[in-house]
Image: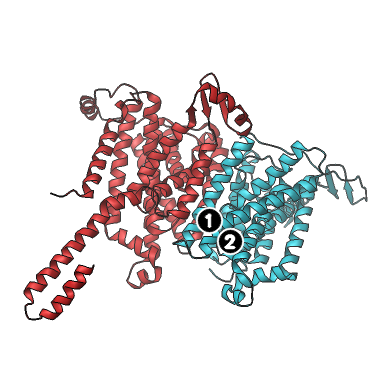
Chain colours: A red, B cyan
């Protein structure tokens, strides 16, 4: 048996899934609430980044309102639950439907035109929606945010999960982490099947050549709107679930800055590959957390005091350098450089190399075998066969 | 008519004041949108970092006036123009020129994302340098005290009849008007301006008669950024400044260029004035004064949606 690259991919997938499952008790995390929360947030961003990639990487349309849709769904759910007293799961359904409806309206408004218009409209929509939410204190709670009640979780399921994960009650973020991981897994699975279905082909066809796709009977506008609505609804769903576990949403969660971060995650991971984008998001979220405070020896730190004037903060007592805004600058520059020199992102080419190259080699091998068989069958045309085989050898 | 005005918005002088204030701010919107139009017509891209040039223009004025108190305000405004021009030129050379040369796949998508990436970087660079707290520049111009009966000024305010107009806004609008005039003169009366127009009409034909389209790209992007920087530099004494101040500003310029028609210079001028007046009237007539300021930007979004619904080419647009 020969060694195949696909085995590396299987191995990595297994390690990734195992890591996802055991993350709360990994050494270094050790059930500390803060790090469990970081893991949960990373998964939240992973859902957002991969659903953004579904729209951007497959249809070539850019929505800057992804975070705004996330907020729209969450606020809809929160306000309905607060004012009408419906159960949280019904609020969730209503919130997701709301993002779908607004997504449909904006989609039909902008997607008839060239792709710049969606980007222009959504950036304006996102910023203005945030400002309105911030101003309407009586309805939304304003800058102080809106509280969301926790979900009522079925008891039988809870007991079962407690049996599987003995540390389930260690802190309130552990169950939240696992529900988020489940949502991450399911939404990725859903999007994966969507892009593998005929709709995925429609998405790509419309992106590559609008006229050609239309000529072959693809309804260009409807296809784009479908992608936009699905991607927005996933964002809304993830937002509602995440904020139910956090218990609070503030308008600043919808800042355009966070949107930029989601885009940076998707592009650096690889926006044409859902899994690449998701891994990029997890990687970047952890990198940002780790870069927040850089631990270094006091002797070095004392020489870095001048950085205080440039937006860093030097904490001599804790022995750390806080990078504040500059870690974001680093990722912004990484985003621009990735766009310029590696348009497929940094992670998805590796995944492609592990998976697709192998397939190409497999096809080439079968092709050669087929040529071989043709040669055996076709005993009469000796001369042609010889030329053909030399050509094959030359390849 | 009188009844209608009173019902919606109080007295007639109040309405007139709102319109005048709207025109004053509208001139500055026009200046900013003109920059975006220039970029769009020559490079055929929309710059999503336009608001960040506006933000940097303001911060340059703040920094100069904060550290050198004797420097006159106009010098600081000029420096802001120079800095934003240079940032625009360097960025265009590094990231947009490869696109014009065809070295980048899917140029339309690349242009949206890379300008957005620049916005991201600039916001956080300024956050690192200036900190998150709002900065305010004191008024750097005071009127001579005149009394002509109808037209009367105090040090901070100009009275037109009984209508008071804030002096810092008038000063900002005057500088913006001068910049607009200079820019239009440059575009329509100088060789380089004609070259820019030629490139926006037909790149290949322009290249045939000896214009280097790549240099014109750089010039257009840098000038566009400079106009946004100027708008920021004159408005920094009106509003307080944070690193995110450019986001609503760029949203406004997007509304204007879509309203006026993408790539149309008269469109961006008229669109800016219309947006200014609509915002001012809408905010002044909003029933609940507590939330009125937050809805200032909503009117722009409504205009945006209406234009897309009714006439996506805008007022003066030629193509989509």
Nearest to the observer: residue A224 or residue A170: A170
In percent of the image, x 29 and y 30: which residue is there? A153
Quadrant, the N terminus of chain B: bottom right
Tell me if I can see residue A94 in this picture. Answer: no
Residue at 53%, 56% (x, y): give it.
Answer: A120
Task: Mark 1 and mark 2 in contact? Answer it, CB < 8 Å.
Answer: yes
> Is residue B89 something that shows in the picture?
yes
Q: Residue B8 or B210: which is nearer the viewer?
A: B210
Side of A185 relative to B176 (left or right): left
Mark-to-mark CA distance, 1 and 2: 9 Å
Q: Which quarter of the picture shows residue A240?
A: top left
- The residue lying at 55 percent from left, 49 percent from top is B118
Side of A47 where A255 appears, left or right: right
SS type, badge 2: helix
Q: Position of residue B76 (x, y in %)?
A: 76, 46
- Where is B180 relative to B156, above or below? below
Q: Chain of mark 1?
A: A
Image disc number at residue A120 = 1
Left or right: where A243 falls relative to A371: right
Is the same chain shared between marks 1 and 2? Answer: no
Q: Residues within 10 Å of mark 1 (few under 14, many from 20)?
A: many
B280 or B248: nearer the eye?
B248
Name the residue that disc number 2 marks.
Answer: B258
Chain hosting mark 2: B
Picture quadrant of residue A218: bottom left
């Amino acid at each position: 048996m020969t060694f195949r690259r696909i085995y590396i991919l299987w191995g990595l997938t297994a390690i990734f899934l195992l890591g996802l499952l055991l993350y709360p008790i990994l050494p270094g995390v050790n059930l500390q609430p803060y790090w469990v929360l970081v893991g949960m947030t990373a998964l939240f961003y992973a859902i957002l980044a991969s659903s953004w990639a579904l729209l951007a990487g497959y249809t070539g349309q850019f929505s800057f309102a992804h975070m705004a849709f996330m907020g729209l769904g969450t606020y809809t759910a929160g306000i309905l639950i607060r004012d009408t007293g419906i159960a949280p799961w019904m609020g969730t359904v209503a919130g997701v439907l709301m993002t779908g409806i607004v997504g449909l309206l904006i989609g039909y408004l902008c997607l008839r035109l060239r792709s710049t218009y969606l980007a222009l409209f959504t950036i304006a929509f996102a910023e203005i929606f945030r400002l309105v939410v911030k101003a309407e204190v009586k309805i939304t709670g304003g800058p102080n945010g809106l509280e969301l009640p926790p979900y009522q979780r079925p008891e039988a399921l809870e007991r079962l999960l407690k049996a599987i994960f003995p540390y389930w009650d260690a802190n309130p973020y552990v169950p939240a982490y696992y529900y988020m991981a489940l949502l991450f897994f399911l939404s990725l699975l859903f999007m994966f099947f969507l892009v593998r279905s005929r709709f995925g082909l429609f998405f790509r066809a419309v992106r590559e050549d609008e006229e050609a796709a239309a000529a072959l009977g693809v309804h260009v506008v409807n296809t784009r709107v479908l992608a936009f609505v699905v991607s927005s609804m996933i964002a809304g769903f993830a937002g509602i679930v995440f904020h139910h576990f956090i218990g609070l949403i503030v308008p600043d969660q919808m800042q355009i800055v966070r949107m930029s971060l989601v885009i940076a995650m998707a592009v650096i991971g690889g926006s044409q590959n859902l899994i690449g984008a998701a891994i990029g998001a997890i990687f970047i979220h952890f990198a940002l957390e780790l870069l927040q405070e850089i631990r270094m020896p006091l002797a070095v730190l004392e020489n870095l005091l001048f950085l205080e004037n440039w937006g860093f903060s030097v904490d001599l007592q804790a022995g750390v350098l806080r990078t504040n805004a500059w870690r974001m600058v680093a990722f912004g520059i990484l985003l621009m450089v990735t766009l310029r020199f590696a348009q497929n992102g940094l992670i998805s080419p590796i995944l492609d190399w592990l998976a697709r190259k192998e397939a190409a080699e497999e096809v080439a091998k079968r092709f050669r075998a087929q040529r071989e068989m043709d040669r055996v069958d076709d005993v009469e045309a000796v001369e042609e066969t010889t030329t053909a085989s030399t050509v094959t050898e030359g390849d | 008519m009188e009844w209608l005005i009173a019902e919606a918005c109080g007295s007639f002088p109040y309405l007139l004041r709102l319109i005048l204030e709207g025109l004053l701010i509208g001139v500055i919107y026009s200046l900013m949108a003109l920059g975006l139009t220039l970029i769009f017509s020559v490079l055929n891209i929309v710059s999503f970092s336009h608001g960040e040039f506006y933000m940097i223009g303001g911060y340059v004025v703040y920094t100069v006036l904060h550290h050198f108190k004797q420097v006159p305000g106009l010098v600081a405004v000029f420096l802001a123009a120079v800095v934003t021009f240079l940032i625009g030129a360097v960025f265009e050379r590094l990231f947009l020129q490869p696109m014009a040369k065809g070295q980048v796949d899917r140029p339309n998508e690349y242009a949206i994302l890379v300008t957005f990436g620049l916005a991201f970087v600039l916001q956080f660079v300024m956050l690192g340098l200036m900190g998150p707290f709002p900065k305010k520049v004191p008024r750097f111009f005071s009127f001579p005290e005149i009394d002509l009966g109808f037209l009367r000024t105090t040090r901070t305010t100009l009275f037109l009849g009984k209508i008071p107009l804030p002096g810092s806004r008038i000063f900002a609008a005057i500088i913006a008007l001068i910049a607009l005039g200079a820019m239009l003169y440059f575009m329509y009366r100088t060789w380089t301006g004609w070259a820019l127009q030629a490139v926006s009409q037909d790149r290949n034909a322009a290249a045939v008669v000896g214009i280097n389209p790549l240099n014109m790209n750089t010039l257009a992007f840098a000038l566009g950024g400079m106009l946004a920087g100027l708008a920021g530099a004159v408005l920094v004494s009106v509003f307080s400044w944070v690193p995110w101040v450019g986001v609503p500003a760029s949203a406004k310029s997007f509304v204007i260029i879509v309203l006026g028609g993408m790539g149309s210079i008269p469109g961006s001028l008229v669109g800016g004035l219309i947006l200014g007046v609509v915002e001012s009237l809408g905010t002044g007539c909003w029933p609940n004064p507590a939330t009125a300021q937050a809805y200032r930007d909503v009117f722009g979004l409504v205009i945006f949606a209406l234009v897309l619904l009714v006439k996506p080419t805008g007022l003066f647009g030629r193509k989509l």
